[in-house]
Amino acid sequence: MKTEAAARQWGSTLDSVVVYAQGALCRRLARGSVPRDGKVRVAGLPRSLDPGSLRARVLGVPGVRVTEARVDVEAGTPGLATPDGLHREVERLTDEYAAALARRDRQLGLIEEVRGLKPVPPARRRDDPHRRTPVGAWLDLADFVDERLTRLHSRLAGLERTVSSVEHELDVATDRLARASTDAPSAHVPTTVCAVLTLDRPGDTGVVPGPDGLRAAGTEPEEDGEPEVEVELEYAVPGAVWVPTYRLTCRQGDSDGRLLMRASVAQRTGEDWTGVRIALATADLRRGNDLPRLRSIRLGRRQAAPAPSGWREPPAGLAGLFSGYDAAGSPPAVRAASVAAAGGPAVLPGGPVPSPAPVAAPRPVLPPSAPAPAPPSAPGYGGARPGLAPQAPSGRPAGRARSGGSSFAGAPGRPAMAAPAPGGAPAPPPPPPPVVVPPRPSGTELDYAALVLSGPDESGTHRGRLFPGAPTDPVAQEYRRRAESVASLPLPGDAVRPRESAGSFDHRFDAAARTDIPSDGTWHTVTVTEIPVGLRTEYLTVPSVEQTVYATLVLSNATDQALLAGPVEVTVDGEFLLTAALPTLAPGAVRRVGLGPAEGIRVIRRTHLNESTAGLRHNTTVLDHRVHVELANGLARPVTVEVRERIPVTSEPDVRIEERADWTAPEAGTGPENHAPGTRLWRLDLPAGATAALAGGYEIRIPTGKALVGGNRRS
């Protein structure tokens, strides 16, 4: 059976992560025995988490619930710092590389020594005759040098290969170390972030000490020991982003295809996501959820100030909250400092040094009818400030005599209030109480979890009241700042952030399998799901702009889930074709994706303009435009071609436009894209190797005194 100390420290594993447009929501599972006091610590949380987002609940055990959950940071005992595997590998390869270089340099030195071998004849004296050169010795030496150099160069080639191999391994290990995960504390003293939970077991009505330790009040110790429970922790972390990517696989002539949705995910949260379930959402993790409130408007001389949200009147008896503390006096250190400041005995390490005995002040004489004054005491919260005379219940100073005679002096630094002379003017009435205006708390003051109760040593305006506590841990803020740096990563080509492509709707995509994403701040590809889409291949041409036919894929989303904008890799008949930009497809929407020019289809466009006049007085100018388009299909299969033309549009009442063609105007909101006003379409099916001719035109009738901007004769 586990000990109490071991049961209070639980390990945890990361089970699932939901990555939002920026940030992530992590879910951890922890299992362990519930101690008798219900206090457990769940370790393994990252340092960059948001403490206000921690949530905890018990799974599968009825009656056991979490009554408190908070984040705590512990400092571990510093031990011997042992390098991790990557550091050790880099150091080993560095030593091995230096040794390989040394062996190669020694081999180069041997080669230079052998290369320097040459025959040296003996010194010839003046009287010695000429000697014959021993050719055999020269040849033997040359053969020896040649054989020796051959062996040395052969060994040098092997050493060069070893140096190159070790250098490559060292470069790879150095790169891996530079790209290593940040899931490791960088401080000298290791710190651990854990969740402190308080669990309420069935039948617990409190924890009381017993003969065998702590036990629940009103219950007997359980015979089966401490129950095993599973706790789910949920918390939010910054430093995670994602963008969608796709891969489209189809075959020529098919009316459907498979769209594989993938996601590029980057995270630097400080913990590695190993074997977790990934879900991707387009929502904003930090968006506000406060409901708007419409207040009424009153007309009159004065409007009552609305009650501030979150503010409550101080409870009754707040002034006497620290009365016992004030009656006991201030702490010894504060008391000694006050005495020293007032001229009393100074406290030294050897003991207090006595000062001259003070001269006793004359005691005031009270009349027999005057009651004895109450001993002065430090005021509580809401009382008079130090330095003011204490007030009596009647509103007058407490030390003031009721009749003639002397009176108590006020507080130090304030002159004593003299009694009025007999028969004098009556005392002025007390001033009216000040109007108490309810404060308007700020956002930090309404964060109740971060408020701290001010103690008795605070100033008079803070004693016993709730105020915002100390600022957030600066170390945790630095971890969050580093985590949020992934938001500035450059996006892959044609990628669009999900918050921009989703519009005003939020979507969620669940990955089909568990995956691993290290905390290194780089993009990692995750397979999400496979979505069936309807598609058809169409060819589009706008000959008035460019006499080229383009191949397009018309995609239709028949599912109940939207497809966000992003890059799509198109594979046709098992061969990669190109990477295009997929627009956002809402459920039921149809969009067109361009595949580039179709070289097998040709288009030619010719225009003709005839200008004439009409009317009884020839007061109308008629501009007759004729358009001729010819198409030729050089492919081995029939194709569907859409030809786009345009006619002018006008808002002038005396200008008329008459069409003379069999083209059609696109219906608004029914096609895969929006068309500009004046767009006209021809749609025709071309068999393999066939040609077609299209003819159309329109007339523009304008008054003779007017003309088109830029001239009437233009295409």
Image: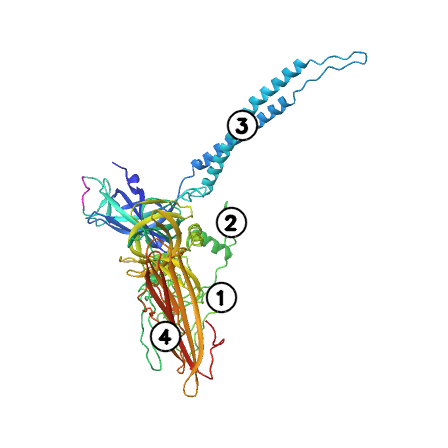
User: In the image, which is nearer the foreground, mark 4 or mark 2?
Assistant: 4
Res 372 visible: no
> Which of marks 4 and 3 precedes in the sequence?
3
Q: Name the residue under label 1.
A: 413
Q: Which residue is drawn at 61% across and 17% down?
A: 144
Q: What residue type is labelled 2?
A: Val
Q: Say few, some or many: other residues with alpha carbon within 10 Å of mark 2 (under 14 / 14 to 19 / 20 or more).
A: few
- 124 over 688 or under it: above or below: above
Q: In the image, is residue 604 part of the stretch drawn in magenta?
A: no
Q: Which of 528 and 55 is in front in this view?
A: 528
Give the percent coordinates (x, y) of residue 213.
25, 41
Q: Do the residues labelled 4 and 2 touch (CB within 8 Å)?
A: no
> Which of marks 1 and 3 precedes in the sequence?
3
- Labelled disc at residue 157: 3
Question: SS of the residue at dot 1?
Answer: loop
**Span highlighted in magenta in the image:** 219-223
- Disc 2 from disc 1: Cα separation: 28 Å
Give the percent coordinates (x, y) of residue 188.
45, 41
Q: Which amino acid does label 4 sit on?
A: Glu
Question: SS of the residue at dot 2?
Answer: loop
Q: In the image, is residue 220 part of the stretch drawn in magenta?
A: yes
User: In the image, which is nearer the foreground, mark 2 or mark 1?
Assistant: 1
Q: Nearer the viewer, residue 499 or 601?
A: 601
Give the percent coordinates (x, y) of residue 627.
41, 70
Q: Say few, some or many: other residues with alpha carbon within 10 Å of mark 1 (under 14 / 14 to 19 / 20 or more).
A: few
- In the rendered image, the quadrant that contains the N terminus is top left
Q: Mark 2 points at which residue?
A: 353
User: In the image, which is nearer the foreground, mark 3 or mark 2?
Assistant: 3
> Which of marks 2 and 4 precedes in the sequence?
2
